Image (cartoon, rainbow, N blue to C red):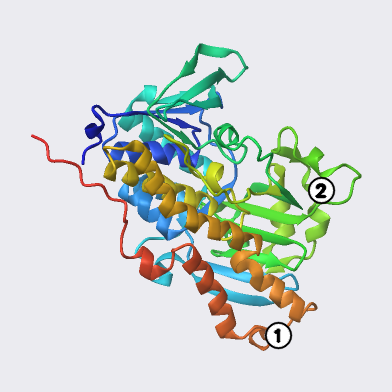
Amino acid sequence: MSPHAYGQSPHIVIAGGGIAGLTAALALHAAGFERVTVVEAAPAIRPVGAGLNLMPNAVRELAALGLLDALEAGAVRTRELRYYHRSGGLISREPRGLGAGYRWPQLSVHRGHLQQVLAGAVRARLGAAALVTGVRVSGVEPLPDGRPRLRLEHREGAVRGQASLVPDILVGADGIRSAVRAALHPAEGGPPWNGMLVWRGVSRMPARAVGSFMLIAGDDRQKAVVYPMSRPTGQSREVLVNWALARPAEPDGAPPEERLRGDWDRTVPVETFLPFYEGWEFDGVSVPDVLRAADSAHEYPMVDRDPLDRWTHGRTTLVGDAAHAMYPVGSNGATQSIVDARALAHALARHSDDPSEGLAAYERERRPVTTALQRANRERGPEVVIDLAHARAPHGFTDIHEVIPADELAAIAGRYAATGAFDPTTVNQGSPYEVPLPATG
């Protein structure tokens, strides 16, 4: 059915102009929904943040939206992932993307580039008025017919125009501290902190200094993730390098809730954490050298969200981190947000006579998968191989297969891929979210 079976194309408001919200807007437009508005609290969509990895299942969906060429212009294909023990011992090396048998690549990309590609496509396809910045959804009240009444605020806090808006459908894509989620689950409280800190940043280095692979290294206490995310440029053949570190917070006497207040994106000197990673070098990639080359470093508490037993209330639902924020393990944050967006548009188009049933169908498909990934990531997901190696050989090893048999390593990776339905067999069947539009003319 066409979305016009509603009587007219419904007005869909998306709270949040990040990866989940922008992809949802594009997916809904591709499925035939004409009236889609994205409201974003930031005053402008700017290329900020660090890097991320997009798994082939997400790249498949972006390709279906016609975005792959623009995305790859500022990204690199991730061809290999290597796990190391902090002593330097190689735990495993896995082909990724096309090399692992997928029909689509795995991509390493700066978050800002991805967001700019998405925002540009929204403006080009839906019109400039479809993306409203400087406005946030600060409250949601369900009406008897299931539609949500929204409170909109200007970024400085003053009400922008009328105090309320009643769209046909609301999609909460406003991140881990989602106002939409808080309105639907007012007793939940804030995201729980596991006591770990995460430091992120971007460095510019000669390509020869960082290799062509993605590395994840560490022990049972701390880890480092490093990978290039751009092609070499200039005479010096420099590349952008993404890095992320995790380690328990040092005791400072402050209660845990103090670390969760205010702006989590706290700029800190690299020297704050550099000493913990001195001597970390893996097949020629020096983690300290990467850190010293950073323009800046940002500190965050490692938080996620407890899985919900319900995302959808009437004509309001959640996508991305607002629905299922998870620990940064397994390259699944942005990946699952993109899949959410496509699944949502597909479900609404399939149930064009009943938006509530469309949202419920979306949740029935997506919530079990993302809940399983949230729980798997709390158990370290595929990165648990580092913990196992350290537990069995804390001082290092010469042959990993004497520590962890090859079939055990393969089983860990396979279970995680199956949990998220991103194994090659499943992904290569093609997108299940294509919406055939009615013929015209």
Alpha carbon separation for disc pair 2 and 1:
32 Å
Instruction: Identify which residue, 429 or 255, lies in the foreground.
Output: 255
Q: Residue placed at 33% from the left, 46% from the top?
A: 347
Q: Quadrant of the N terminus?
A: top left
Image spot of residue 288 (x, y percent): 74, 57
Residue 210 in sight from this viewpoint: no
Q: Residue placed at 37% from the left, 24% from the top?
A: 128
Q: Quadrant of the C terminus?
A: top left
Disc 2 or 1, which lies upstream in sequence?
Answer: 2
SS under mark 2:
helix
Query: Can you say whether 429 is above or below 389 in the image?
Result: above
* 35 left or right, relative to 218: left
Q: Residue placed at 59% from the left, 20% from the top?
A: 155
| Residue lying at the far bottom of the rendered structure | 402
Q: Residue placed at 54% from the left, 56% from the top?
A: 371
Instruction: Identify which residue, 112 or 203, lies in the foreground.
Output: 112
Image spot of residue 214 (x, y percent): 57, 63
Name the amino acid type tagged 1.
Thr
Query: Can you say whether 259 is above or below 125 in the image?
Result: below
Image spot of residue 268 (x, y percent): 77, 41
Q: Residues within 10 Å of mark 2 (few under 14, many from 20)?
A: few
SS under mark 1:
loop
Quarter assignment of residue 322: top right
Q: Which residue is mark 1?
A: 398
Image spot of residue 83 (x, y percent): 62, 70
Quarter assignment of residue 246: bottom right
- Marking on residue 271: 2
Name the amino acid type tagged 2.
Glu
| Residue lying at the far right of the rendered structure | 253
* 99 left or right, relative to 228: left
Q: Residues within 10 Å of mark 1 (few under 14, many from 20)?
A: few
